[in-house]
Amino acid sequence: IPKLLGITFIFLFLICFIVISMKNKNGKISVIIGCFLITLYSIFNVLLTTNVITLPSDEFVPNFYNKTLSEVNDWKIKNNIEVIENYEYSDTIKKYHVISQDTIYPTLTKEIEKITMNISLGPDLEKEVIIPNFVGKKIDDVLKYIEENHLSNVEIKYETSENSIDTIISQSASGTLRRNALITLTVAKTEEMGDAEIIDFTGKSKLYAEAWLNKYNIKYKIEEDFSDTIEAGYVIKQNITGRTINLETEELIITISKGKMLVAPDISSMS
């Protein structure tokens, strides 16, 4: 819009220039030269506005914080810049996303030949953490704790018990453990749970979905697919929702995200 307004202003100026010049005795040469220069300028602006031509621009090095490795690769290839990748664990930055970089704004892209970036490997699952005793806790609270603390090998079983429904009645291990250590939690349920309306698991973790389905003895199958919007390990979609399921004839299919698809660039011409 600003460019179009500028072109309009130039044309109005051109008309005024012609009118004023025609009143002068020696104005014809001025009119010819002025019209020629302004016409060239106007044509240039039209071509620039419609993207028929583009001007070279000095681009600053982008801030890639929390951006994907795929986005870094696209920029690297476009600008022919060497990217040195250092990998480290992070509890806050997703796997294969940028944690930090050594060159930032206001450095111009054309001024550098290489850049160093620290890339996340996700949480360190070998890291030792202190696992509390969950006995007596509600399963929903425990699932939240498991997710926030990146515990990756938790198994949840349901057992008929006189204890409060949905509370942990036993736990296989606690104390100082690795995040990927097997922890089996047994949750109380009544002898007859009855039918349950299938809830929407979209955006919930695989562990949460399996815990809920096992509670009602619902048959299910896990499928996996890539997703640009749902984090890896979380539900993208399901084939049944908002109604009860026939335990004899129906099976719930839930699709778990594998994260974003990493598109490999063409490296056939590279060293």
Image (cartoon, rainbow, N blue to C red):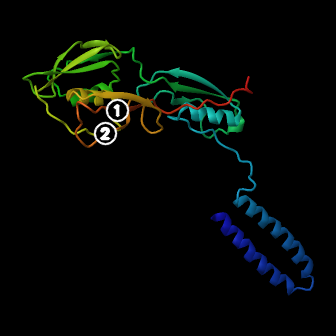
- Locate the N terminus by quadrant: bottom right
Q: Where does residue 196 sit, x and y in percent of width and height?
A: 19, 37
> At x 26% / y 39%, what residue is drawn?
199
Residue that mark 2 sits on: 240
Whether residue 261 sits left or right of residue 61 in the image: it is left
Amino acid type of the residue that numbered disc 2 sits on in the rendered structure: Ile
Residue 49 image-quadrant placement: bottom right
Residue 64 image-quadrant placement: top right
Can you tell which mark lies on residue 236?
A: none
Visible in this render: residue 232? no
Q: Where does residue 122 sit, x and y in percent of width and height?
A: 45, 24
Label 1 close to label 2 by CB (< 8 Å): yes
> At x 81% / y 84%, what residue is drawn?
19
Q: Could you tell me which secondary element the residue under label 2 belongs to? A: loop
Amino acid type of the residue that numbered disc 1 sits on in the rendered structure: Ile
Residue 180 image-quadrant placement: top left
